[in-house]
Image: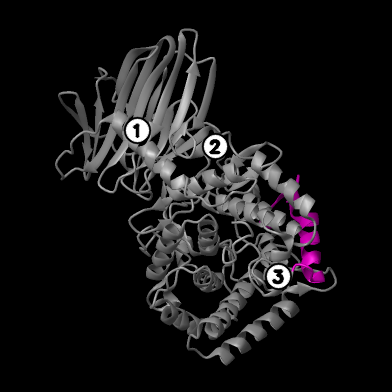
Amino acid sequence: MALPIADYALIGDCHTAALVGRDGSIDWLCLPRFDSGACFAALLGEPGHGRWLIAPSKTPGSTRRKYRDGTLILETEFDTEEGSVRVIDCMPLSNRRWDVLRIVEGLKGRVAMRMELIIRFDYGSIVPWVTRAGATQFATAGPDTVELHTDVNVRGENMKTVADFFIGEGERASFVLNYRPSHEAPQQGIDPEKELRTTEKKWRQWSNRCTYRGRWREPVVRSLITLKALTYTPTGGIIAAPTTSLPEQPGGVRNWDYRYCWLRDATFTLNALLLAGYHEEATAWREWLLRAVAGSPKDIQILYSVTGERRLDEYEIDWLPGYGGAEPVRVGNAAARQFQLDVYGEVMDTLHLARAAGLEPEPAAWNIQIELLKFLESHWQDPDEGIWEVRGPRRHFTHSKVMAWVAFDRAVKDAERYGLDGPVEVWRQKRDAIHAQVCDSGYDSQRNTFVQSYGSPHLDASLLLIPQVGFLPPDDPRVRGTVDAIERELVVDGLVLRYSTATDVDALPAGEGTFLPCSFWLADSLILTGRREEGEALFERLLALGSDLGLFAEEYAPRERHMLGNFPQALTHMALVNTARLLSIPEKQAKTASEKGERPGSAAEPPAGQ
């Protein structure tokens, strides 16, 4: 069985990523990009579905691990009766090749080591044909070839490649796995030690550009490195997570493929990058966004591939038993075909933030926005599947309507501030009409709280975003009442559920963990409504729930005390960065932004002293 989710570390090259277990096994890797078929899929099955283990032959007495400061280079140290060793793992940053680099370093004594390589292409279903030429081993099947380069003697054993070797104090042994399309000629091997130094230098240069100097710099930088690692460099697209089908409930069916880019995350992403000074990455993300949504507004999707592809057909892989037996394992995501009103607001808000933050203007952006608004003018009153991509009937979700309001609000502001042409009076009328409708139909006056959807008695954590997008100021009694209601009805052991799955709103079996991004949103709401100490305490508690490497999944089981869902999760790390920002700016600045109908933690207005 796979390890607990928190026992995995992320390494990556900004094209794809791998999960490395505390036990020294790489149990997940898709090549050549995030959403390609996995050649190591033991995470969702067993070792025979593909993995790469390098660890002491005997079970170690203790294990320690860390990232080198400011990098995505992992160091795992094993202590055994024979001595101690360190395994260094990374993926060199390159736009020309794909490599996984593993170096074993002897620290003390002389330790017997075991290397076990099981390559199974297409999510563990295809056994490759293996050949050798000198010290290089080639594994080929169909379009894929993986090469293993090492000076250690390896041998075949039961359809896998293994090596048994010793490593003494001061000695180092290297292993390099290279991927290439099988029709291409082999590439020249890399110098492992040189590549390790180069990779460390590149990551340090990148992380040192971070302009955030607040109290929580360490978790902020780690989150930003994680977001960078989830970025597909050729296009600027940022995926939600590098995994598929890690369950939101142990043994359950809420298992989804997150290896795609969600428009829902657009503003959070841009803000997180901008506030830390990463304008190049923010611009690349904006450009990806504009390319993805180009075309007919009625065809806009909620998610796309890293290159902007739209056909993400969902299917199930029946040969993988799933993480902890959670079936089915899914590839693709049927939510790409859903209708979600909120994405129009996310796109408009993202481009509004880009202008306000001073990103170089994109001439075509405003024309695209006008077309999106034309569509929204006649469709904002339609029901949709909502931010959580429910697979039940469409509803008039309150958050969706709020984001439709955001779309027209940002259009009015951009037209007025930047002299952009458009039917501003029409947009202003639509904005006012949506606001009035939400306050009437999306609000329960008897309970003093906004509700999940029109006419529903149920709550939804997305309502916590109402003051953050400027729909109402934080000190509005309806906002305070909503925060109080969510604390009463959706909080479990201090953490926030997205909504009650027992209501059958999503047409799935009930049960899932608390949602970590929503828990950060609650911290934001507490800060904004004058309960700063409580908000900071919740933020600190959330930081403590991360793994020993500072990584977060999407959900958390507070009673069982373990993470749930795909890992690591970009939205959680974005939320962490944004809450740290909110805690690092003067309360007056946040209040002023809210009064202007802007996001209080927006990167558009740099905090004093930064």
Farthest residue in the right direction?
446
User: Which residues make up the magenta segment?
Assistant: 474-502
Which is more toward the observer, 336 or 464?
Answer: 464
Secondary structure type for disc 1:
helix
Q: Which residue is mark 2?
A: 5
- In this picture, residue 15 sits left or right of residue 423: left
Which is more toward the observer, 437 or 238?
Answer: 238
- Categorize mark 2 by other alpha carbons within 10 Å: few (<14), some (14-19), many (20+): many
Residue 435, given in percent of the width and then of the height, sits at 68, 80
Q: Between disc 2 and disc 1, whose residue precedes?
A: 2
Residue 478 painted magenta: yes
- In this picture, residue 67 sits left or right of residue 215: left
Residue 289 painted magenta: no
- Categorize mark 3 by other alpha carbons within 10 Å: few (<14), some (14-19), many (20+): some
Q: Between disc 2 and disc 3, whose residue precedes?
A: 2
Q: Which residue is mark 1?
A: 196
Label number found at residue 294: none
Q: Which residue is mark 3?
A: 592
- Categorize mark 1 by other alpha carbons within 10 Å: few (<14), some (14-19), many (20+): some
Q: Are marks 3 and 1 in contact (CB under 8 Å)?
A: no
